[in-house]
Image (cartoon, coloured by chain):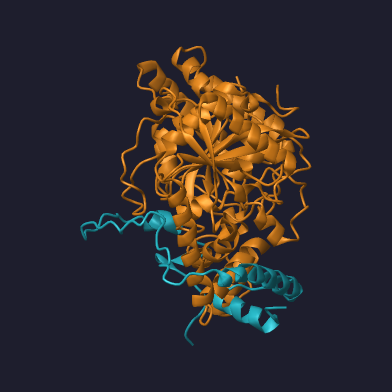
Amino acid sequence: MHEATIAHLAQSLKDRKVSSKELTKYFLERISRLDTSLNSFITVCEEEALAQADSADELLATGDATPLTGIPIAHKDIFCTEGVKTSCGSRILDNFISPYDATVVSKLKAAGAVMLGKTNMDEFAMGSSNETSFYGVVHNPWDTTRVPGGSSGGSAAAVAAQLVSGATGTDTGGSIRQPAALTGITGLKPTYGRVSRYGMVAFASSLDQAGTLTKTAEDSALMLQAMAGADERDSTSLSAIVPDFSKAQKSAWENITIGVPDNFFDDSLDTKNAQLVKEALSVFEKLGARIKDIHLKHIHLSVPVYYVVAPAEASSNLSRFDGVRFGHRSEHAENLTEFYMKTRGEGFGSEVKRRILTGTYVLSAGYYDAYYLQAQKVRQLISQDFAEAFKTVDVIAGPTTPTPAFRIGQKTDDPIQMYLNDMYTIGAPLAGLPALSMPCGFINNLPVGLQLTGPHLSEEKLLKAGYYYQQETDWHNFVPPGYEA
Amino acid sequence: MLLNREDVEKLCLLSRLEITPEEMEDVSAKLSDIVNMVKQLQAAETTGVLPMAHPLDQAQRMREDKATETDHHEKYQQNASLVERDLYLVPKVID
């Protein structure tokens, strides 16, 4: 059962070959047996899940089910879940029980999905390796001495090890696509605003976007369908019509033009990784796609732009964690300033502190124009380069990461090396574009990803390219050794 | 180093974030590395470029100025460490 996709499980549930309760118990058993080696969950919600499964079975009996009714999923611990701890991977929220559901959570609940628990993540989604979590490192199921990527590392590891059929994630600079690539699964970051951010703990509000981590692009369409749409509680959510993603991705193939930026194939890219991406492109060529070389003039500046804009927004967003209304509160303060400083000093980990301080620095008097304003101008140029490219190509393809998963501890002492991991994924969120990563091969038994980026609101195109690619290849069917049974 | 101890202490106060004396050297060194890395932006030619305000160039949506939220203070205050007579308590601010 665990090897089945959401699409297959939905059919089995519909045909009453299995009940949601059976599925839920089955996956809960896998989590308790296998997650000790991965640490992909922060909270497992056995009682709530079984109750949701009962309701799902009732819906399935009356024929009022959606394709997600009764499907076991997990939420990244950044999404507020009513009555369930929402830690964001941080000590400062270790005691926080959310009083309400995020829109993503309530929408998936309404579609009948069963939440098995909350997945581990880099603290406040700040990280590319899932090593900054207060709850410990998540291990990559392909090699447990290696990182699963981050920040949605718990969701990625859980889906790759088949502890859950699909999971939510969030992506600010690559936090869905990079872990999806490093664990051999499919990750979709939708267009900025396609999915509501209400109840999703804010990191960098102009970049944050919720998305999906699943085995296939077909499953990604099913989850996105339930998650997408305008939300009056998030004024940045888009009012654009939500198309039928599953129908669109399975429609007849039309020959597309795929742009391949030369900048993505520089010295930073592992040569075997480059070769696997080129092989993936030849699959599209066989389908009839045209490959066109392009150049994104300013993309090499996306990492420095990101490390100004994201910390600036984070330093402002994270000021809400003051120990007064919720979260950790220091017991060692004499006055109010000391109270804030100690509460936050004790509650935040070192990477979060570094980003808050960086953000405060680039926004402070005398530096604002030189750093923040200049970064927002270069961001505009990066965005214009994409817009220009999309005049002649339908999607842009390249690697998701420069290398396969690295070893735990390998980059923790060098933030710059860690940040450079996201060099291929940061461009899309800076420009608000949707992007998909899917497995395209292995290097020494470690998976790597192919990334497709499209114009605003082109999720159908990306999901269709993904679906057709996965009809021609079987990289998405490989399972990490030790997690087959 | 680009940022010395004094700079970091000032940033810590502005950010209301305590750094222990043991952390100080490492924080200064790594912050300096980050600032050094983002400095390369200054070489980019941006004359006449408008800073990006929103990835999709959207305007803020307006709604009727009407209260829509209901009172949830009891539920919300369950997450607070110290509450008395529906008020959040903080250390003494005024003597």
Residue A207, can we see it? no
Find the residue positioned furthest to the bottom: B95
Residue at 44 percent across and 51 percent down: it is A388
Residue A13, can we see it? yes
Query: Looking at the image, which is closer to me, A450 or A388?
Result: A388
* The quadrant where residue A358 appears: bottom right
Give the tally of numbered discs.
0
Chain A palette colour:
orange
Q: Position of residue B84 (x, y in %)?
A: 44, 67
* The quadrant where residue A59 appears: top left
Residue at 45 percent across and 58 percent down: it is A206
- State whether residue A83 is above or below residue A282: below
Q: Position of residue A353 (x, y in %)?
A: 63, 66
Q: Position of residue A147 (x, y in %)?
A: 72, 45
Residue at 58 percent across and 79 percent down: it is B13
Query: Looking at the image, which is closer to me, A415 or A457?
Result: A457
Query: Looking at the image, which is closer to me, A167 or B38?
Result: B38
- State whether residue B87 is above or below residue A82: below
Query: Looking at the image, which is closer to me, A462 or A271?
Result: A271
| Quarter the N terminus of chain B occupies | bottom right
Q: Position of residue A380 (x, y in %)?
A: 45, 61
Chain B palette colour:
cyan
